Image: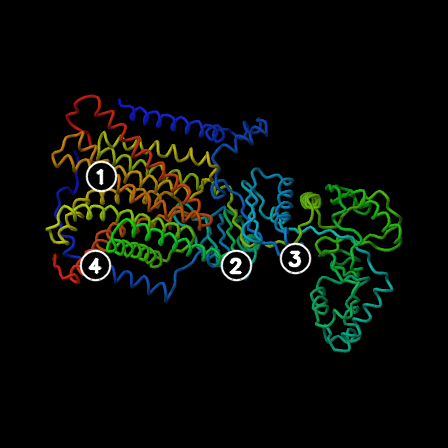
């Protein structure tokens, strides 16, 4: 064996050992039963999972969200790092929600891509991530101030004959005529009232330091369901920034001891502010507003020095209370976010895809392998060994780069198998041709490799070029496909040109070979 | 030694005019369909929602449709065949969150039927047009890069023939996808690009041999040189096409619904990619070669 041959052999052996070593964590991780995973130290399990090949959401199930941060209402200074702050806050929320291996990335100017593998409740996660969670404490205007405003609105609407119906009782008081008591409207009347309040020009009647906001939907009062309208002082007394911690809790309301809610503790500064605001406004109502909806508006009975506050309301259950506590702890998003695209794959679909992808991959490979063995005999077996190494290097490289295996990625692997076979076919056919021209076996093998190499190189280069462009400009499935294809092509160049050549050199170097099994 | 197609001497180039007519007809049909009717784009390009649901019992497509229509849900319904007749694909071209609506419609109108959400792909209109642009970018840039590479490695006549074959294969495959009513989605675009790669790969193998033979056989007519080269590479061409076809067929038959359109495109692309290496790429290179000679005043034909 010559020195270069020894070098090649050493190279192949080293790459193969390295590949097996890289794949060992994947083997460990994916052969583990759920019970074994439970028993393992979470930190160790996390490390193992990081080293194992990542499965795409299409294979393991989960949710992918593309969010857009709406910066339109921010000042330029606020807009500057709004997306980065939003990413951090979403990251915090997901951390506390508990998803293994989430991926949260900024894409482009104002988009955030969120990947949550293994998620089972997409609706809840969407709610949690998408909530702006802007918490505000605002004072409710006094009864007199409210009455004055409503009267002004009524007469303005009546003068313009903007009335909800032909009912003569409503001709003079279009708005307050529908009111049951103290800002409360029946559910069926709410759309009418909203339409009245949306009349152009009505804004000018509301003082600039005052604001009208709705309470939660389906509120029960005096045996009816409906919704309350609040007249508030526009400037917030405190915001979510004053909240130090928040927990889901039960029994926060005396009137409804079984109900869930969220109890909050304030920061030292928040505590001082809260004490001052409550001390100065005893007897008035303080509204707690979340994302523009009044959650509740309790009367201030006394100065509250402890800084304890709570959010309660009829609609909370244990999950929604927990999620609200999470978003309050993680903080408000600097601007509202909107889901631009969503892709959810249920766990059953994912495992079906794995099964189908593997079945197809195995059958395809077996057919190709069988054909090669029959057509090229011993040389076919060399090609199959090269193919096996090729696949081994491919998956090992994916584990090393932390690439994600997706269903289109499996398609890319199948195509790699096709390309690998073609490489060997090119070489073998060329060797056969040289043999037919009466050249010696040594000479034929050498010429076969040399002459086929240029073609193989061109073929791989063009495919690699298109794969790289696919990776650069492609999205989602295209990218996954491009990744496996590019790695596969490189692995193939190595196995076909270095590995199989080495086998032949060894084979032919052992003495006189009468007949080449090809 | 098991051998197929060795020592053949098929006069491929003699029939190239028939092939021109055949190829032109298919390409023209594909282009006409594309511009007049347009392909059926997947939700990733149009925006909208694609829901994949599974019910606990098989419900006839009409019954399912009635249940949805009763709730005013406008969706394109497709029932899966084969092993999964209790699975349905619902396409919504409009925006909104239809999961709950569908759930309500089923529980309200189909008694005893429960559904499991298998997948939900929702794409906003803005993202849809983004993805469309990116896909077009990916196709054009990778085709452009291949063109540059082939242009550097080969003479002009070859590069032109190779690129013509590339467009031919992509268009014909797109045509077959449209004729069979398949959806053009991101995955299918990936398949089209793979076919582009395969097509140029196959063309290059034949071109390499033509170039090699052209040097050795200076005295022969150009068409003869081409025929010899094509015949010499024929066994490799057929074997490779056959193995890639096998791999794609396995994906088509066992790879599940997600990969079906992808593998269908691959099957069509492999057949036409092999054909076009000879009858588009080489044949065009030959005619350009002859035309160049004629202008120079030489006649090799």
Is label 1 or label 2 in front? 1
Query: How far apart are labels 1 and 2 at the CA level?
Result: 51 Å
Query: How far apart are labels 3 and 4 at the CA level?
Result: 60 Å
Establish whether labels 3 and 2 are both on one chain: no
Establish whether labels 1 and 4 are both on one chain: no
Q: What element carries label 2?
A: helix
Q: Which numbered marker is on residue B288?
A: 4
Quadrant of res A422: top left
Q: Which numbered marker is on residue A76?
A: 3
Query: How far apart are labels 4 and 2 at the CA level?
Result: 45 Å
- Is the C-beta separation of discs 1 and 2 under 8 Å? no
* x, y percent for residue B291: 18, 61
Q: Mark 3 lies on which chain?
A: A
- Viewer-closest of B238 and A198: B238
Q: Is mark 3 on a helix, strand or loop?
A: helix
Query: How far apart are labels 3 and 2 at the CA level?
Result: 24 Å
* x, y percent for residue A426: 24, 39
Identify which residue is drawn at 82% across, 54% down.
A286
Q: Name the residue under label 2.
A: B126
């Amino acid at each position: 064996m010559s020195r270069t041959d020894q070098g090649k052999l050493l190279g192949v052996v080293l790459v193969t050992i390295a590949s097996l070593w890289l794949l060992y964590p994947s083997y460990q991780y994916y052969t583990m039963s759920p019970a074994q995973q439970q028993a393992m130290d979470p930190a160790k399990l996390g490390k193992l999972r990081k080293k194992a090949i990542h499965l795409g959401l299409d294979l393991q199930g989960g949710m992918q969200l593309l969010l857009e941060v709406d910066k339109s209402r921010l000042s330029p200074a606020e807009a500057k790092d709004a997306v980065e702050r939003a990413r951090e806050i979403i990251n915090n929320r997901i951390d506390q929600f508990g998803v293994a291996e989430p991926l949260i990335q900024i894409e482009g100017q104002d988009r955030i891509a969120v990947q949550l593998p293994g998620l089972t409740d997409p609706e809840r996660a969407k709610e949690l991530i998408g909530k702006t969670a802007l918490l505000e404490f605002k004072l409710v205007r006094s009864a007199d101030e409210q009455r004055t405003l409503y009267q002004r609105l009524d007469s303005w609407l009546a003068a313009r004959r903007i009335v909800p119906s032909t009912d003569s009782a409503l001709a003079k008081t279009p708005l307050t005529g529908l009111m049951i008591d103290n800002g409360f409207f029946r559910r069926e009347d709410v759309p009418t009232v909203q339409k009245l309040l949306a009349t152009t020009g009505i804004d000018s009647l509301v003082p600039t330091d005052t604001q009208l906001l709705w309470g939660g939907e389906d509120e029960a009062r005096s045996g009816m369901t409906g919704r309350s309208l609040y007249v508030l002082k526009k400037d917030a007394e405190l915001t979510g920034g004053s909240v130090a911690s928040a927990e889901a809790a039960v029994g926060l309301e005396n009137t409804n001891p079984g109900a869930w809610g969220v109890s909050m503790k304030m920061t030292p500064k928040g505590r001082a502010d809260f004490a001052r605001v409550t001390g100065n406004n005893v007897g008035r109502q303080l509204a707690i507003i979340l994302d523009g909806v009044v959650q509740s508006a309790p009367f201030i009975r006394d100065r509250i020095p402890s800084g304890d506050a709570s959010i309660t309301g009829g609609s909370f259950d244990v999950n929604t209370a927990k999620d609200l506590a999470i978003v309050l702890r993680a903080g408000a998003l600097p601007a509202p976010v909107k889901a631009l695209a969503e892709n959810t794959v249920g766990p059953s679909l994912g495992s079906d895809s794995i099964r189908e992808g593997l079945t197809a991959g195995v059958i395809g490979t077996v057919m190709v392998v069988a054909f090669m063995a029959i057509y090229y005999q011993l040389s076919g077996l060399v090609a199959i060994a090269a193919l096996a190494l090729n696949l081994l290097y491919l998956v090992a490289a994916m584990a090393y780069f932390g690439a994600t295996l997706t269903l289109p990625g499996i398609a890319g692997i199948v195509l790699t198998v096709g390309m690998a076979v073609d490489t060997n076919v090119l070489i073998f056919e060329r060797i056969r041709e040289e043999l037919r021209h009466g050249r010696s076996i040594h000479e034929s093998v050498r010429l076969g490799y040399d002459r086929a190499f240029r073609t193989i190189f061109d073929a791989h280069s063009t495919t690699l070029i298109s794969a790289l462009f696919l990776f650069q400009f492609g999205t989602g499935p295209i990218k996954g496909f491009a990744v496996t294809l590019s790695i596969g092509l490189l692995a193939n160049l190595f196995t076909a040109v270095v590995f199989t050549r080495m086998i032949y050199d060894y084979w032919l170097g052992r003495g006189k070979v009468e007949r080449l099994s090809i | 030694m098991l051998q197929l197609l060795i020592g053949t001497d098929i006069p491929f180039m003699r029939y190239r005019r028939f092939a021109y007519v055949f190829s032109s007809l298919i390409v023209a049909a594909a282009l006409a369909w594309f511009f007049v009717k347009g392909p059926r784009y997947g939700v990733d390009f149009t925006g909208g929602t694609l829901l994949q649901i599974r019910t606990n019992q098989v419900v006839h497509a009409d019954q399912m449709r009635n249940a949805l229509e009763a709730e005013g849900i406008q969706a394109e319904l497709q029932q899966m065949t084969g092993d999964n007749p209790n699975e349905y694909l619902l396409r919504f071209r409009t925006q909104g969150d239809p999961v709950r609506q569908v759930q309500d419609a089923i529980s309200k109108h189909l008694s005893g039927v429960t559904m499991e959400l298998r997948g939900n792909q929702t794409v906003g209109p803005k993202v849809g047009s983004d993805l469309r642009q990116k896909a077009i970018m990916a196709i054009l840039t990778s085709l452009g890069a291949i063109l540059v590479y082939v242009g550097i490695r080969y003479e002009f006549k070859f590069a032109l023939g190779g690129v013509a074959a590339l467009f031919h294969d992509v268009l014909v495959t797109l045509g077959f996808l449209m004729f069979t009513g398949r959806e053009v989605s991101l995955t299918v675009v990936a398949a089209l690009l793979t076919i582009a790669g395969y097509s140029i790969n196959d063309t290059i193998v034949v071109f390499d041999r033509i170039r090699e033979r052209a040097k050795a056989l200076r005295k022969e007519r150009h068409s003869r040189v081409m025929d010899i080269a094509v015949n010499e590479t024929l066994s490799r061409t057929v074997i490779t096409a056959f193995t890639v076809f096998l791999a794609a067929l396995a994906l088509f038959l066992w790879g599940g619904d997600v990969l079906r359109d992808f593998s269908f495109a691959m099957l069509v692309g492999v057949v036409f990619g092999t054909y076009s290496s000879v009858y588009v790429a080489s044949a065009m290179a030959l005619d350009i070669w002859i035309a160049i000679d004629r202008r120079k005043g030489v006649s090799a034909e």
